[in-house]
Image (cartoon, rainbow, N blue to C red):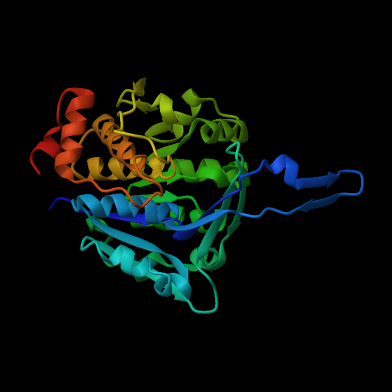
Amino acid sequence: MPKTKVLVLGSLAFDYIMGFKESFINAVSIDHDKEEYQSTVTADSRHQYFGGTAGNIAYNLGLLNIVKVYIVGSVGKDFKSLGYKEHIKQFTNIELEVDIHEDLFTAACYIVNDIKSNQMIVFHGGALDKCKDINLKDKIKNPEDFAYAINSTQSVEAMESFADQLYNLKIPTIFDPGQVTPLFPKELLIDIIKKSDILIGNRYEINQIINKTGLIEDELIKQTNAIIITQGSEGSELLYKDAKGRIFRVNIPIATPDKIEDTTGAGDGYRAGILIGLTLDMTLLDSCHLGAIIGSFVVETIGAQTQKFNIDNVRQRFFDTFGYIPQGLEQL
């Protein structure tokens, strides 16, 4: 029987985006000798968006409604009252297997952008910090039905626990340490990479992994099956090895969006494309191509979960970008 399910692990969070019509430089006072800091920022705009790595990935999977998606995580008392639960439940192919902690808030990211596009960011984990206590066996009853899982950015403790559990459950895994990469001890980072099938990160994050582990890319690829490096407007790069251990590198261009409004969540769209491609038994290269396509739709609207597209849109842009349509997409 074909495996038709994917498991998405990571953060579910509210993003609060605010604007500041001045420069932060003019609003900050720092005395390094006295270790004193003072800043007063009056935001002129405030918007709430649904976000978090798991939420962003799942949203794109929900739009296409091709695979069955299980989101496992921890949220707070405001998850339902602020509309996130209803937002996710609009998709019939997504199952929410989340623990609700009534004494905590759902994770939140507060971002203020000044007039020069500098950012001031405050992140509050809240209920997300409870993910480290989750037992996947309590959440998923048939692990053999899962084509892939993505172990995406959250606390080191949670990612370590999930890596061990996924390995024991024999669910192929994409490891996505993201911005918490510097917090991993060297040996733990190497151990999780060895237990994962694919390592993904942007160029900065992969360089951090190289520096942390002391392994260059050609040595790092020996610890896993493939490495995917996203590079923003420069596209992405796929490193993989064949059965004989030979290493191959493929540069993957971006897909051109109709417009660019906001790049937030584009990388999560890319990850959603990979998960769909692999579940449809497409090659890893074609799956990365699909990731580039879905990422291009994300940037066309403000917010990581506001874009709209369907399978016909995806097929057309795939053909326009790469000149063919993979069989997995063609037969849908």
Q: Is residue 246 left or right of residue 109?
A: left
Q: Is residue 80 left or right of residue 63?
A: right
Looking at this rendering, what residue extends furthest in the bottom direction? 102
Q: Nearest the camera: 24 or 143? A: 24
Residue 257 visible at all: yes
Numbered circles on residues, count: 0
Q: Nearest the camera: 177 or 299? A: 299
Q: Nearest the camera: 37 or 45? A: 45
Above/below status of 142 relative to 330: below
Q: Is residue 3 left or right of residue 271?
A: left
Above/below status of 151 relative to 85: above
Q: Quadrant of the C terminus?
A: top left
**Which residue is drawn at the image coordinates 81% and 46% (left, top)?**
29
Looking at the picture, how far across and down is residue 290, in whole percent? Answer: 26, 35
Image quadrant assignment for residue 208: top right
Image quadrant assignment for residue 181: top right
**Which residue is drawn at the image coordinates 37% and 39% (left, top)?**
299
Q: Nearest the camera: 168 or 253? A: 253
Looking at the picture, how far across and down is residue 149, in whole percent? Answer: 34, 51
**Which residue is drawn at the image coordinates 54% and 56% (left, top)?**
109
Looking at this rendering, what residue extends furthest in the right direction? 33
**Which residue is drawn at the image coordinates 27% and 57% (left, top)?**
69
Looking at the picture, how far across and down is residue 30, in whole percent? Answer: 82, 45
Residue 140 visible at all: no
Above/below status of 103 relative to 311: below
